[in-house]
């Protein structure tokens, strides 16, 4: 793996990757990273309808590195269901480093879902070190709400929508300001529309797969601009780090 563009060019070991995705100190504010992989033709999922078929080992290492010192991993209900999220744990060394920095010993998984049709029956995301947080609307299906509450902490909005900006503010109130938003496209579109994205970590996958399995999203009224910080190349994948212009 090699940094081919950026302030520190040259080979990079996977153990050093988190240093290239730092979490800048923020006084009581969120730092929100969007993490996505896209094919050369812009698809967010392969023929199986999942991102797993368009990712690779190098991209997986970057994905893991970005998560390692995050406070919260934010996903939409669609992604959680499609991708079968496993539990979030830290290694002993990472847990020590996190605790020394005043963080919990592992990231918490945060799900945004209106329907609350979440995969609760196995130990997937609910087997994480920390109890998952689920953000939903004021009036979800009562039976599902009760089921989700058995394994997760539920935070309800006041109305029938869940604004991403409101979710971010609630996370910051809990001291969870290092937020990595892992998608999918619908949640990322709302996160971008909210104006709260600080960074976009986008992997270009060396594939052309067609976009039939990629959910379409509404256009943004105000497209967001980002500045390129670095590009890592490995196995024909390009892992780019873009930071919002006024943060770079
Ligand atoms: N390429 C990548 O990096 C990547 C990353 C993640 C996912 N994916 C792929 O993307 C596809 C899923 O896409 P998607 O757009 O459906 O994913 P998504 O954004 O994770 O899921 C959409 C669902 O999340 C909930 N949701 C999202 N934003 C919400 C909001 N503001 N308020 C209330 N609920 C909200 C809703 O769940 P309810 O239906 O429960 O109400 C909505 O139906 C899958 O094929 C997955 O494999 C690709």
Image (cartoon, rainbow, N blue to C red):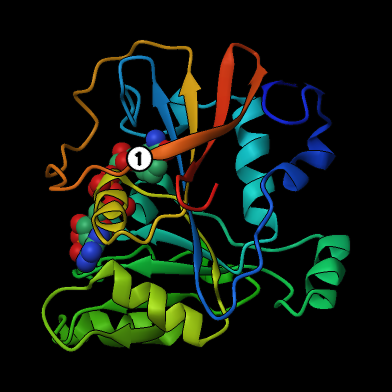
Residue lying at 45% horizontally and 50% vertically, measured from the top left: 182
Residue 52 appears at what percent x and percent y? 47, 32
Q: In this view, does 131 lie to the left or right of 80?
A: right
Farthest residue in the front direction?
246
Q: Is residue 210 visible?
A: yes
Residue lying at 55% horizontally and 72% vertically, measured from the top left: 177
Residue 88 picture quarter: bottom right
30 up-or-down from 154: above or below: above
Residue 24 appears at what percent x and percent y? 65, 61
Judge by depth and name the residue closer to the eye, 1 or 22.
Answer: 22
100 up-or-down from 194: above or below: below
Q: In which quarter of the image is the N terminus?
A: top right
Q: In this view, does 23 lie to the left or right of 99?
A: left
Residue 120 appears at what percent x and percent y? 40, 69
Q: Is residue 120 visible?
A: no
Judge by depth and name the residue closer to the eye, 61 or 189.
Answer: 189
Q: Residues within 10 Å of mark 1 (few under 14, many from 20)?
A: few
Residue lying at 69% horizontally and 46% vertically, measured from the top left: 65
29 up-or-down from 146: above or below: above
Residue lying at 51% horizontally and 75% vertically, measured from the top left: 29
Q: Is residue 159 left or right of residue 198?
A: left
Q: In this view, does 39 lie to the left or right of 14?
A: left
Secondary structure under the numbered disc 1 in the rendered image: loop
The residue tagged 1 is 225
């Amino acid at each position: 793996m090699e940094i081919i563009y950026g302030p520190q060019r040259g080979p990079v070991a996977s153990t050093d990757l988190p240093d290239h995705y730092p979490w800048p100190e923020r006084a009581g504010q969120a730092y929100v990273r969007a993490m996505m992989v896209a094919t050369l033709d812009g698809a967010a999922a392969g023929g199986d309808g999942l991102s797993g078929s368009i990712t690779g080992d190098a991209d997986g290492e970057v994905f893991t590195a970005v998560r390692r010192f995050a406070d919260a991993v934010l996903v939409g209900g669609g992604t959680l269901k499609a991708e079968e999220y496993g539990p979030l744990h830290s290694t002993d060394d990472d847990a020590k480093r996190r605790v020394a920095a005043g963080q919990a010993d592992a990231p918490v998984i945060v799900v945004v879902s209106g329907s609350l049709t979440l995969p609760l029956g196995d130990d997937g995301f609910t087997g994480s070190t920390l109890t998952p947080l689920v953000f939903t609307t004021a009036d979800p299906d009562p039976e599902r709400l009760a089921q989700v509450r058995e394994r997760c902490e539920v935070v309800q909005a006041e109305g029938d929508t869940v604004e991403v900006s409101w979710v971010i503010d609630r996370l910051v109130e809990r001291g969870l300001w290092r937020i990595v938003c892992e998608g999918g496209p619908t949640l990322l579109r709302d996160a971008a529309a909210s104006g709260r994205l600080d960074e976009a970590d986008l992997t270009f996958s060396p594939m052309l797969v067609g976009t039939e399995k990629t959910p379409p999203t509404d256009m943004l009224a105000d497209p967001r601009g980002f500045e390129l910080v670095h590009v890592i190349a490995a196995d024909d994948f390009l892992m780019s780090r873009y930071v919002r212009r006024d943060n770079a």
